[in-house]
Image (spheres, helix red, strand yellow):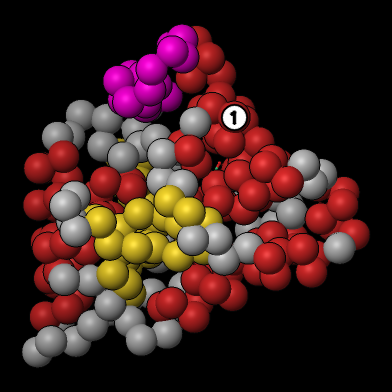
Amino acid sequence: MDTKINIAIDGHSSCGKGTLAKNIAKELGYLFIDSGAMYRAVTLYLLNEGISLEELNDDPAILGNIKIDFVLNPEKKFFETYLNQVNVEHEIRNMRVSKYVSPVSTLKVVRDFLVKKQQEIGQNKGVVMDGRDIGSVVFPDAELKLFITASLKERTLRRFSDLKNVSMEEIERNLDQRDYDDSNREENPLVQSKDAILIDNTNLSKKEQLELILGYCNKVILG
Ligand code: DC
């Protein structure tokens, strides 16, 4: 019957897992949460306030000043990220934030703060969350775990078509560095959980991926 599950989607930067997660949530009528947007929102806050990583580490109570919400845009029909009541959906995707987000996301105080929020969101099930540690740390009991990847070249090309005024070389360097940082940090590194299904989407269209994954979802939901 209508059993709600949590779906954890992890993988490398810019492999399209956000769009995928968003579409799966739409098809199932589930809530989509972009956990990367939460790390980006914290990063933007620190940049705007001029707060260094050391200062934050020494005074984690600073995080109490950060309120992150996902608000439905009725025209676009998807949720946008708000930082302290301001729509930051576009700003959090720029290179200034992209360059600083990996070091910010290595901090234990930041991870503890955001993981707790993410677990609260997931407690009633019916959530599709994408990130790096969703299957391993945030929802270790998720009924369905997916690990998405694509070649670095393909990911660079996809990101290049989304961004303006940034060279292909700069994008490739940033992705390569983030892959390294995400996989090698001490706190909650990017890992494929043993029970996650691996999907390399280098040669798959968005439609093909969605169909493949909805098949997995239905198998779990319908038993
Ligand atoms: O998914 P994204 O590229 O928007 O994520 C931005 C950064 O946030 C990424 O470099 C790693 C970090 N991140 C993380 O450490 N853990 C998550 N669950 C999600 C993102």
| Label 1 crowd bin: few (<14), some (14–19), many (20+), radius 10 Å | few
Q: Residue at x 56, y 34 (%)?
A: 98
Based on the picture, tell me whether residue 89 belongs to the magenta stretch: no
Q: Residue at x 26, y 46 (%)?
A: 19
**Front residue of this view, candidates 35 and 67:** 67
Q: Is residue 186 above or below residue 206?
A: below
Q: How far from the left and from the top, in percent, is residue 145?
A: 35, 64
User: Could you tell me residue 181's position as x and y percent?
Assistant: 65, 38
Amino acid type shown at disc 1: Arg
Please state the horizontal and vertical placement of residue 108, each as a whole percent of the image. Answer: 74, 60
Total marks drawn?
1
Predominant secondary structure, magenta span: helix
**Viewer-proximal residue among 187 and 83:** 83
Q: Is residue 191 visible?
A: no
Give, as a single range, the part of the protein colored magenta.
Answer: 152-168
Q: Which residue occupies the foreground of this view, 47 or 9?
A: 47
Residue 159 on the magenta segment = yes
Residue at 39 percent of width and 35 percent of height = 14
Q: Is residue 184 left or right of residue 8?
A: right
Q: Quadrant of the C terminus?
A: bottom left
Image vertical order of residue 53 relative to residue 157, above or below: below
User: Which quarter of the rendered picture does the N terminus lie within?
Assistant: bottom left
Q: Nearer the viewer, residue 62 or 153?
A: 62
The residue that appears at 87% across and 52% down in the rendered structure is 55
The residue indicated by pointer 1 is 96
**59 over 22 or under it: above or below:** below
